[in-house]
Image (tube, rainbow, N blue to C red):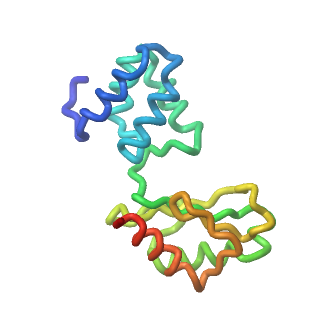
């Protein structure tokens, strides 16, 4: 890599050491990179392509195909609002509106302090609990916009322990 890297490459080096240097390792490597950096930094993707012997275009193709991967920095807590039919009918729009008001960001944006990222998702398969709000890994069924503050506070309190 000719340009200086803007990210700490030590996590990447440890990740690459765990896998064979071949194309078959690509998705596993990208999953570990996503976990380590909370997104897929461009400099890191270049190094992944070089190490695995995969064209950079293929690495970017995989990185943009799967919704689990992000090319922009994500918040420490990702908040997902299900907008499937059942959730939409039962108030998902109000949840999104309240998130926009509270965090001052729109879906697919991240707060400037990198605390939160808001995303909308099509269906989480929990229609009986609609509307569903996922804060980090915690599912909140029958979620209410009025309780949004308590959902976020519970997550932040849990992160501090």
Vertical placement of 2 versus 22: above or below? below
Residue at 48% across / 25% down in the picture? 57
The image position of residue 143, as x and y in percent, is: 66, 75
Residue at 41% across / 58% down in the picture? 75
Whether residue 84 sits left or right of residue 68 in the image: it is right
Kindly give the residue lying farthest to the front in the view shown: 161
Q: Could you say which is closer to the camera, residue 114 or residue 11?
A: 11
Whether residue 112 sits left or right of residue 136 in the image: it is left
Quadrant housing residue 111: bottom left
The image position of residue 84, as x and y in percent, is: 75, 61
Residue at 55% across / 44% down in the picture? 68
Q: Could you say which is closer to the camera, residue 73 or residue 33?
A: 33
Quadrant housing residue 159: bottom left
Kindly give the residue lying farthest to the left in the view shown: 4
Q: Quadrant of the N terminus?
A: top left
Residue at 47% across / 45% down in the picture? 70
The image position of residue 40, as x and y in percent, is: 41, 40
The image position of residue 33, as x and y in percent, is: 40, 36
């Amino acid at each position: 890599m000719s340009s200086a890297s803007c990210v700490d490459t030590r996590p990447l080096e440890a990740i690459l050491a765990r896998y064979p240097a071949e194309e078959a390792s690509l998705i596993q490597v990208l999953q570990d990179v996503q976990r380590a950096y909370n997104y897929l930094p461009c400099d890191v993707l270049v190094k992944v392509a070089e190490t695995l012997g995969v064209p950079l275009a293929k690495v970017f193709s995989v990185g943009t195909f799967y919704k689990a991967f992000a090319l922009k920095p994500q918040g420490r807590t990702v908040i997902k609002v299900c907008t499937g039919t059942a959730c939409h009918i039962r108030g998902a729009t109000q949840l999104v509106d309240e998130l926009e008001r509270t965090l001052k960001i729109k879906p697919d944006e991240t707060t400037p302090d990198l605390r939160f990222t808001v995303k909308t998702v099509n269906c989480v398969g929990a229609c009986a609990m609609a509307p569903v709000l996922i804060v980090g890994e915690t599912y909140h069924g029958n979620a209410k916009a009025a309780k949004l503050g308590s959902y976020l506070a519970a997550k932040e309190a849990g992160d501090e322990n």
